[in-house]
Amino acid sequence: MADMDQALSRRERKKLQTRQRLLEAALSLFHEKGYGATTVEEIACKVDVAKGTFFNYFPSKEALLHELSILRVGQLSAALDMNRGAPPSPVARIKLLMRLLQEQAIPHKRLARRAFATHLRAPPPPPDEARHQIFGLLTNLVSEAQACGDIRADVDVEVAGDLLLMSFFWQISQVTCDASDSMPASHEHVVDLLMDGLAGPAWRRT
């Protein structure tokens, strides 16, 4: 029985490795050729697996694009770790997360535009994992900020998370529609206005 459990564990690790390699291959090809010009066959070939193997992991190329969004959320979560240099203030980490979300879209503008359009045209069925994870990061930070008095206690955590998330989607729409490769000048101003309402003007002094 122990040998069988160990064998299953090895198979699961191999499946996770193949899934990761498919994601990395797709991301590389999307940047090299563009999302529309990249085929499922090319992604599978780059990983040296059969086309059918691709569909064992992802039902479509659009589904893989959504999985890439989830992968990026994991990277954002790591960037908010105070042990890795993130600021101790929850409000500062909220601002950091909002900035990183936007900065992440700039070098991958065409891909972000495609992902945004795909999400609007055919939203993933609930739960939308990427959105759920980002919302979770935001609400956790709001709860932390309330616990240390940086955000008003009468603010509903989920309402605050929704406001910040809507701000993020607005920022992404600005980035993907802008021809330049820089963040809109209004980015910091929008976040500051939200924080004025959530935390009160005193937060700026901290």
Image (cartoon, helix red, strand yellow):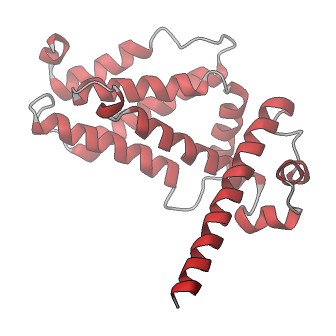
Q: Tag count in the figure?
A: 0
Q: Residue at x 37, y 24 (%)?
A: 96
Q: In which quarter of the view is residue 57 placed?
A: bottom right
Q: Position of residue 192 (x, y in %)?
A: 30, 17
34 in relation to 136, above or below: above
Q: Is residue 124 left or right of residue 95?
A: right
Looking at the image, can residue 114 be seen? yes
Q: Quadrant of the C terminus?
A: top left
Q: Residue at x 54, y 82 (%)?
A: 5
88 in relation to 66, above or below: above
Q: In which quarter of the view is residue 89 placed?
A: top left
Q: Position of residue 114 (x, y in %)?
A: 71, 37
20 in relation to 198, above or below: below
107 in relation to 146, above or below: above
Looking at the image, can residue 159 be seen? no
Q: Position of residue 20 (x, y in %)?
A: 66, 52
Q: Residue at x 27, y 44 (%)?
A: 140
* Residue at the extreme bottom of the image, as rendered: 1
The residue lying toward the viewer, choosing from 16 and 137, is: 16
The residue lying toward the viewer, choosing from 82 and 203, is: 82
